Amino acid sequence: MISIDDMAAFCKQKGLVYPSSEIYGGLAGFFDYGPYGVELKRNIMNEWWKFMVSSRQDIVGMDGSIISPKAVWEASGHLSSGFADIMLPCSKCKNSVRADTFLEEKMGKALGTRDLKKIDELAKKYKCPVCGSPFANSSLLNLMFPITIGSSDTAFLRGETTQMIYLDFKLVQNNSRLKLPFGIAQMGKAFRNEISPRNFLFRMREFEQMEMQFFIRPKENKKWFEYWKKERMKWFESLGVDKKNLRFRKHTKDELAHYAKSAEDIEYKFPFGWKEVEGIHDRGDWDLSNHSKHSKQKLTYFDDEKNEQIIPNIIETSGGLDRAFLVFLYDAYDDDKKRGNKVLHLHPKLVPIKVAVFPLMKKDKLPDKAKPVFDMLKAEFACFYDESGSVGRRYARMDELGTPYCITVDHQSLEDDTVTIRDREDTSQVRVKIKDLKEKLKELL
Ligand code: GAP
């Protein structure tokens, strides 16, 4: 498995992901998706939406705003110490580390506490990784990003996409006429002022989430929690992720988020260890009760089975899109020494380019024969045309982006209107009539 730094370099070289604002020196924790990265990312989003929303009758989507007033985040608890990282500042230089990740790496086990005094005791054994000086006392850094609206009002960039779903829950439920149990899904940007963003797309300050809140009757939490654990694992596996690289991990009491009654993560085996890619959370009635209290609005649901107003409980599935992107890349990445190039064995539903069309050479009127083939296919598939360099190099470039099929127009094509289809997985080629090509590709993809 390649290191995370090598993966970042590969992504930059292949037009998948770039460090943001790089010509000005960059900004830690921010990245831009390039031409092929944005296609892969959109395909992941589409597959999530299909799985979670369009293929179901009990879940609808919404798209809430990114900025919201302070009151929202006071009610949700995100401005409290519960949504803060513990920072260990160096006593000499300006460097700070995140206490839990730093100490866990040093001790080789979970920290198991958020008590600042205990953390200061533990930190005495270690030194600042930058200058070797002892640490000063630890402190809390809230993760929310404040911004100013107009000249004075403080608002916040959302720390999770979820909250907008709670705020609009009555409207959505009325409009879509859903009855319990039902879900509301949303994906989009979230922002956290992380102390030490690192590991490329794994810990960013601006990232994307794919979240779904499932509204249920109180006391049905266990049943739906188990249901959503299975469904979410199924999604990763259905898109080709190797089962042995995925696992569940239950949160201990100390690490539960301020809103969660219980939580389990789906973890992936990255080169830097087993790490969370998605959380399944039992949020009880924490959010609706708090928003109800703070906004003085009734956020209840009339349960006509029981003939009473209830506050629904919530089971949340909360995934990181950028982390999912990393999972799919890592699981697909293969440095194929025999072939002499890298190959991304991505699921055909996720690949940035589905079909590439090449004339064997840029002469003998082969491009004139190949271009109409490209025009015919591009309306149907994400398609790419390339006539530069040797055909071997062009196949290699497509392998590196995971393109499952390459169509080559050669001299025989001029005589009998056939082309070859090359398979990314084993480089085998079959010859088909141009008139049958579209159907054949549909079948293959
Ligand atoms: N609504 C619940 C929630 O936000 P979370 O465990 O804090 O829960 C959910 O975050 C998911 O969002 C994580 O599993 C991860 O995939 C992603 N995520 C969280 N912080 C991130 C960061 N700094 N960079 C990239 N992804 C992040």
Image (spheres, rainbow, N blue to C red):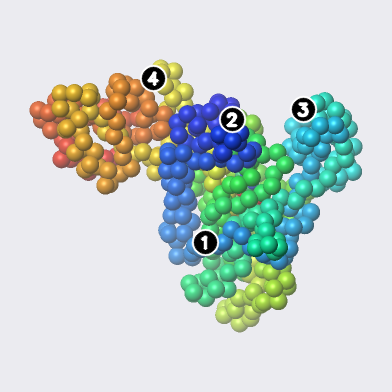
Residue 416 image-quadrant placement:
top left
Camera-nearest label, 3 or 1: 3
Residue located 50% across and 28% down the image: 10
Residue 81: image x %, image y %? Answer: 79, 54
Q: Is residue 258 above or below residue 119?
A: below
Q: Secondary structure at mark 1?
A: loop
Quadrant (top left/top right/bottom left/bottom right) for the C terminus:
top left
Residue denoted by label 3: 130
The mark found on residue 63 in the picture is: 1
Q: Residues within 10 Å of mark 2 (few under 14, many from 20)?
A: some
Cα distance in 3D space between marks 4 and 3: 42 Å
Residue 74: image x %, image y %? Answer: 73, 63
Q: Earlier in the sequence, mark 3 or mark 2?
A: 2
Q: Earlier in the sequence, mark 2 or mark 4?
A: 2
Q: Residues within 10 Å of mark 4 (few under 14, many from 20)?
A: few
Residue located 61% across and 76% down the image: 301
Residue 88 image-quadrant placement:
top right
Q: Amino acid at mark 4?
A: Arg
Specify whether tag 4 is near ligand 1 (CB below 8 Å): no
Q: Amino acid at mark 3?
A: Val
Camera-nearest label, 3 or 2: 3
The mark found on residue 4 in the picture is: 2
Q: Earlier in the sequence, mark 2 or mark 1?
A: 2
